[in-house]
Image (cartoon, coloured by chain):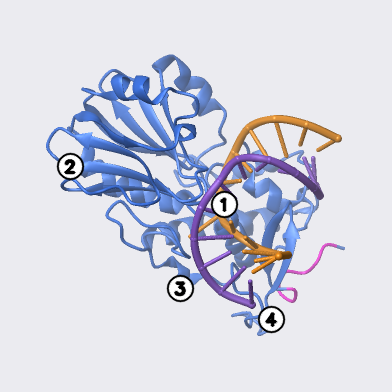
Chain colours: A blue, B purple, C orange
Amino acid sequence: MPELPEVETIVRGLRPLLTGQTIAGVSHSDWPATLAGYPPAAFAAAVTGEPIQGVDRRAKYILIVLGSGRVLTVHLRMTGGLVHHAGPVAPGKATRLVLDLAAGGQVHFTDARKFGRVRLLDPAALPAFFDSLGPEPLPDEFTLDRFRARLQGRRGLIKPTLLDQRVLAGLGNIYADEALYRSRLHPQRSVATLDADDTARLYEAVRFVLTQGIANRGTTISDYRDAQGEQGSNQRQLHAYGQTDQPCDRCGTPIARIVVGGRGTHFCPQCQVPPG
DNA sequence: CATTACCTGCAA
DNA sequence: TTGCAGGTAATG
């Protein structure tokens, strides 16, 4: 479910609710794999009593920064969610982890498909974690030149390259399809064949679709909810993703669906001209 | 690069 | 019953 705009929306919602709070305990933990090998009892002991210094985002990770300098990283993968409740709420069928807050609130990590992961990182592990991910696409420092440098020398197809988090952090299947649609690039174009104008359009499109996604508080197709449990509205702005057989908003040609890099891929076969 | 695995739920 | 799903890691 969640790509950069969804994770950013959750982080902005959680930040004022959690900053300054203290973790009082873990009252529910029903799927040990969620903790990625950390024994549940040890995890509970490790976070209990920790004050929360802040909530941030890196790529598609939610970062809950603790007073000890350790960081809880939450990756929602496909169906994960992180929702705050002002008071105690019974865990639902998909609730995998509940953090109790000293002031009486709770944070529920929900995940129907159980792919999501919550990890407790020591300060010493943070540099390697940050370095394993490509640059954030939205800060001013991420210039067109920087984008071009990231694509320079790459051999593969443009869509799998956009989804590679080591190249660029934050795009997923929805926003990759939307960025390619907006820049009129076929998802199977080889990166090596992109000219200066192609990369300039793609740079603008990536930043546009992500910024618009944040402004619309994320795209809710099915599972995604924000920190308050509310849906986003960006699904109304999609031109390609999930629009199979619908007329292209630019030319009327039916949107096609193919598989690229193992992912369902939506594009306009007229506007996004196939690679020669 | 493609394929498989990880899991559950939903729609065709 | 089959296929598909917003992500990533492991394997060929």
- Residue A265 lies left or right of residue A142; in this view the side is right
**What's the magenta region?**
A269-275
- Inter-mark Cα distance, 2 to 3: 33 Å
User: Residue pushed farthest top?
Assistant: A124
Of the two numbered discs 3 and 4 on the same chain, state the one appearing first in sequence.
Answer: 3
- Residue A271 lies left or right of residue A134; in this view the side is right
| Kind of element beneath mark 1 | loop
- Inter-mark Cα distance, 3 to 1: 18 Å
- Inter-mark Cα distance, 1 to 4: 23 Å
- Residue A200 lies left or right of residue A221; in this view the side is right
Q: Chain of mark 1?
A: A
Give the numbered dot on residue A147: none
Query: Which residue in the structure is indicated by mark 2?
Result: A105
- Inter-mark Cα distance, 3 to 4: 18 Å
User: Residue A37: x and y, percent?
Assistant: 49, 25
User: Residue A68: x and y, percent?
Assistant: 28, 17
Camera-nearest label, 2 or 4: 2
Pointers 2 and 4 in contact (C-beta within 8 Å):
no
| Kind of element beneath mark 3 | helix
Q: Amino acid at mark 3?
A: Arg
